[in-house]
Image: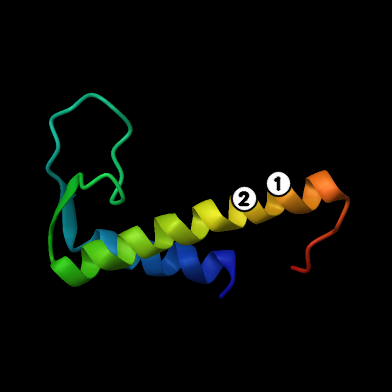
């Protein structure tokens, strides 16, 4: 899945949720800040996790001198 596809899927899922957290912090699905359609929340969590993993892999590749495939 490309980053563009991931973004598109996340944007579509966000239409079925809303932020239901009153705490002052960056809201995320992974932190349980959303309410609404359970499937849309699950998709948002998945998208956030995939982005986190991709960032980590990118840093790892950078640190060991490997150029990841696009």
Q: Secondary structure at mark 1?
A: helix
Q: Quadrant of residue 3?
A: bottom right
On the image, the x and y values in percent for residue 20 come to 12, 42
Q: Residue at x 49, y 61 (%)?
A: 50
Q: Quadrant of residue 13?
A: bottom left
Left or right: 61, with 43 as reference point: right
| Rendered position, 35 above or below 21 | below
Q: Quadrant of residue 36?
A: bottom left
Q: Residue furthest bottom?
A: 1
Tell me if mark 1 has few (under 14), some (14-19) or many (20+) residues whose alpha carbon lies within 10 angstroms of its own. few
Contact check, label 1 and label 2, Cβ < 8 Å: yes
Q: Secondary structure at mark 2?
A: helix
Q: In which quadrant of the rendered image does the C terminus lie?
A: bottom right
Q: Residue at x 31, y 67 (%)?
A: 43
Q: In which quadrant of the rendered image does the N terminus lie?
A: bottom right
Identify the disc placed on residue 15: none
Tell me if mark 2 has few (under 14), some (14-19) or many (20+) residues whose alpha carbon lies within 10 angstroms of its own. few
Q: Residue at x 44, y 57 (%)?
A: 49
| Rendered position, 8 above or below 20 | below
On the image, the x and y values in percent for residue 12 come to 31, 67
Query: Where is mark 2, residue-wise?
Result: 56
Query: Where is mark 1, residue-wise?
Result: 59
> Which colour scheme appears in the figure?
rainbow
């Amino acid at each position: 899945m490309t980053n563009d596809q991931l973004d598109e899927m996340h944007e579509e899922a966000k239409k079925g949720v809303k932020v239901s957290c009153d705490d002052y912090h960056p809201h995320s699905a992974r932190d349980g800040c959303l309410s609404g359609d359970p499937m849309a929340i699950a998709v948002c969590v998945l998208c956030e996790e995939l982005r986190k993993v991709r960032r980590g892999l990118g840093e790892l590749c950078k640190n060991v001198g490997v150029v990841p495939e696009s």
